[in-house]
Amino acid sequence: MIEDNAYNTLTARNQAFIPGALQKRLRHTTLVITGCGLGGVIAEAALRTGFTHIRLIDGDRVEAHNLNRQNFRNSDVDCSKTDAVAERLRAIHPHAQIESVPKFLDEDNAARLLHGAGVIVDTIDFRSPLAIRALHATAREQGIPVVAPMSVGWGGAALVFHPRGPSLAELLGHDAYASVPDFVSAFARLMRRYAAVFPPYALGVLSQILDAGNVCPISQLCPGSYTAAGLSVTLAVRIVAGETVPLAPELVLLDPLTAGSVAAAPELHANEFESTHDALKVCL
């Protein structure tokens, strides 16, 4: 009863936008977040929206340069990212079921760590292409939708992958995972295909970095991280609700300095992929 009252109080202001039945589904859906930099910001937004079963996966530790855009404190530096995020989430809602997994996802543990997820959020560092491949391949095998966000300057963007749509490997090319340079090069080619909808100021910065073969450090802003987090949670809620969401190769983009919001892939067409539709009602 105490736990129910605490949850109802936490989500009371959601009522006009999230019907009671959906709020209940969010409460009991397991959200798995891989990578707890940007993923930590997403986890907090998800908790405040009503997700209470959250599994955090990341073997990294907090560094001082993370503090400009991730929701860590100075006292968290050198601590496990998953433990620091878990502590923060439990301080917000002590009754939440927060699982901290302070290890990197890989081909050996992906099936176990992703099991039972209703939605997965992929914010794994580009320096770990094999982990990204393992995540997406396993999610596809287990029938779990994946939201893959990124901060883009002052805004944010996301791709949504579902087993009935094209895979990340199809978009990037299956040979993209051979090495970090191969993955970065493939990702750079993909971003250039979205050039017409990406904010020019952000695309220019991203292109310079990726064309040079660098994945870290990439300039990122706090507003971009929080925009990407809000976008990710919105998409996750729509997936749990069984509502229509744009699937990859469609890109969902929010940027306050440009037109605002688009869901487009001007040079990527659904007919390039035999297994996809422009949009798909995703039901768990």
Image: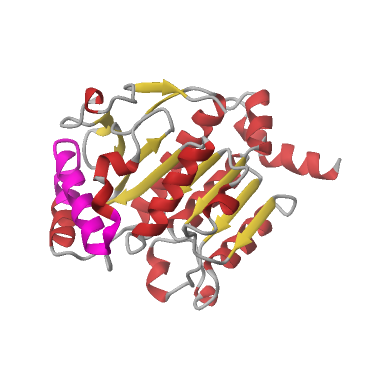
The answer to which of 6 and 52 lies nearer the viewer is 52
Percent of width and height locating residue 38: 43, 56
Which scheme is used to colour this image of the protein? secondary structure
Q: Quadrant of residue 130?
A: bottom left
Residue occupying image coordinates x 32% and y 59%: 126
- Say how many tags the image has: 0
Confirm whether the magenta stretch covers residue 196: yes
Percent of width and height locating residue 244: 44, 22
Q: Can I make out residue 196 in this image?
A: yes
Residue occupying image coordinates x 63% and y 38%: 29
Percent of width and height locating residue 247: 36, 30
Confirm whether the magenta stretch covers residue 1: no
- In this image, 150 relative to 100: left or right? left
| Helix, strand or loop for the magenta stretch, by majority | helix
The answer to which of 158 and 143 lies nearer the viewer is 143
Q: Can I make out residue 255 in this image?
A: no
Residue occupying image coordinates x 15% and y 54%: 207
Q: Quadrant of the C terminus?
A: top right
- In this image, 90 relative to 46: left or right? right
The answer to which of 41 and 215 lies nearer the viewer is 215
Q: Quadrant of the N terminus?
A: top right
- In this image, 56 relative to 66: left or right? right
Residue occupying image coordinates x 57% and y 56%: 56
Q: Above or below — where is 255 with respect to 103?
A: above
Percent of width and height locating residue 8: 73, 37
Q: Above or below — where is 155 with respect to 24?
A: below
Q: Quadrant of residue 13?
A: top right
Q: Residue furthest right?
A: 1
Q: Which residues are magenta?
A: 177-203
